[in-house]
Image: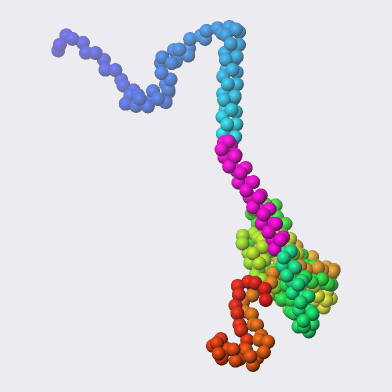
């Protein structure tokens, strides 16, 4: 045996191979940081603490002032854009006023022409004038006044107008059904929000608005009817339009009111002239002239795209 003495074997920890995980879990702070944290903190004088507070407050005020100035500058419109917008608004106002003045002048001239035509026709052929006046009432081109009904429809009440169910709005189909039912019940004239209905009137929707002859209307819709109020109301109650109104008010909470009163309807837009016939003063002479010139029959038919006969 050798005289040297063997060193005893040191027992290893079972988790020696997990030393890294142990350091992370049980000693997350580095030794240097732990030593610095264990040192006593240096005493802080009141003057130094007050100075730091003043510096922090000054920095905060400066940042707030810079932010406020930046927001104001971003929200202020540029001078060039403001000038262009003002100029555009002035042009729109001027063109609108000009269009209104032209429309008013056109209406005055049309009324003057109609008056002179009526006077000339009344003196030349009273029977034809009376027939023409009756046809104008039926066609809706002349104002009408008399006893009648006023039916008002309004959209259902909602909290958010932008988030309303379209079925809770009065739509073009509703007004079409109602007006057709009133015509069938014996109405002599109908207007919706001041727009007189004629044989060529169109009722259709564009978004939330309803167009009557290209004029946009919004709720409430005032349907004015000239006719025998009691007879029209009784006949209207028997039509499918009355059932449709009951569904609108009961299911979709659309507002409705009906009352009998005196109604005054404006005249509608006359239809443009498409065909006109000019009778000859002498049929025999016109026939001879037509045979010699090859112009055709005694009556001459012309077409026009809008003028007056």
**In the image, residue 100 lies in the stretch drawn in magenta:** yes
* Residue 297 seen anywhere in this rendered image of the structure: no
Give the residue drawn at x 60%, y 18%.
Answer: 57
Question: Where is residue 281 shown, x and y percent of the image?
Answer: 68, 87
Quarter of the image where one finds residue 114: bottom right
Question: Where is residue 209 shown, x and y percent of the image?
Answer: 65, 60
Question: Where is residue 107 shown, x and y percent of the image?
Answer: 72, 64
**44 horizontally vs 147: left or right:** left
Which region shows up in magenta? 77-106
Overall secondary structure of the magenta stretch? helix
Give the camera-side residue of 32 and 166: 166
In the picture, the quarter occupied by the C terminus is bottom right
Height in image: 215 above or below 292?
above
Quarter of the image where one finds residue 20: top left
Give the residue drawn at x 15%, y 11%.
Answer: 2
* Residue 230 seen anywhere in this rendered image of the structure: yes
Give the residue drawn at x 55%, y 87%.
Answer: 293
Quarter of the image where one finds residue 9: top left
Give the camera-side residue of 304 and 192: 304
């Amino acid at each position: 045996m050798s005289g040297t003495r063997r060193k005893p074997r040191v027992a290893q920890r079972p988790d020696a191979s997990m030393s890294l995980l142990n350091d992370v879990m049980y000693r997350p702070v580095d030794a240097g940081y732990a030593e610095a944290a264990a040192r006593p903190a240096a005493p802080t004088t009141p003057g130094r603490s007050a100075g730091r507070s003043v510096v922090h407050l000054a920095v905060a005020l400066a940042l707030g002032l810079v932010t406020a100035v930046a927001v104001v500058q971003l929200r202020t419109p540029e001078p060039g854009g403001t000038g262009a917008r003002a100029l555009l608004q002035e042009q729109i106002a001027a063109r609108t006023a000009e269009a209104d003045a032209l429309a008013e002048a056109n209406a005055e001239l049309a009324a003057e022409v109609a008056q002179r035509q009526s006077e000339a026709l009344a003196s030349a052929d009273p029977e034809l004038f009376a027939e023409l006046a009756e046809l104008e009432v039926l066609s809706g081109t002349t104002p009408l006044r008399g006893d009648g009904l006023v039916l008002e429809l309004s959209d259902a009440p909602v909290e958010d107008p932008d988030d309303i169910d379209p079925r809770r709005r009065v739509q073009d189909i509703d007004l079409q059904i109602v007006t057709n039912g009133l015509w069938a019940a014996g109405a002599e004239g109908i207007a919706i929000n001041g727009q007189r209905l004629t044989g060529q009137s169109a009722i259709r929707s564009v978004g939330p608005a309803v167009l009557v002859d290209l004029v946009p209307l919004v709720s409430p819709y005032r349907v004015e009817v000239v006719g025998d109020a009691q007879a029209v109301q009784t006949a209207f109650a028997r039509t499918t339009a009355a059932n449709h109104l009951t569904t609108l008010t009961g299911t979709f909470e659309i507002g409705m009111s009906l009352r009998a009163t005196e109604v005054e309807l404006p005249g509608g837009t006359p239809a443009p002239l498409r065909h006109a016939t000019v009778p000859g003063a002498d049929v025999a002479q016109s026939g001879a002239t037509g045979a010699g010139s090859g112009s055709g029959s005694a009556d001459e038919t012309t077409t026009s795209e809008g003028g007056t006969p």
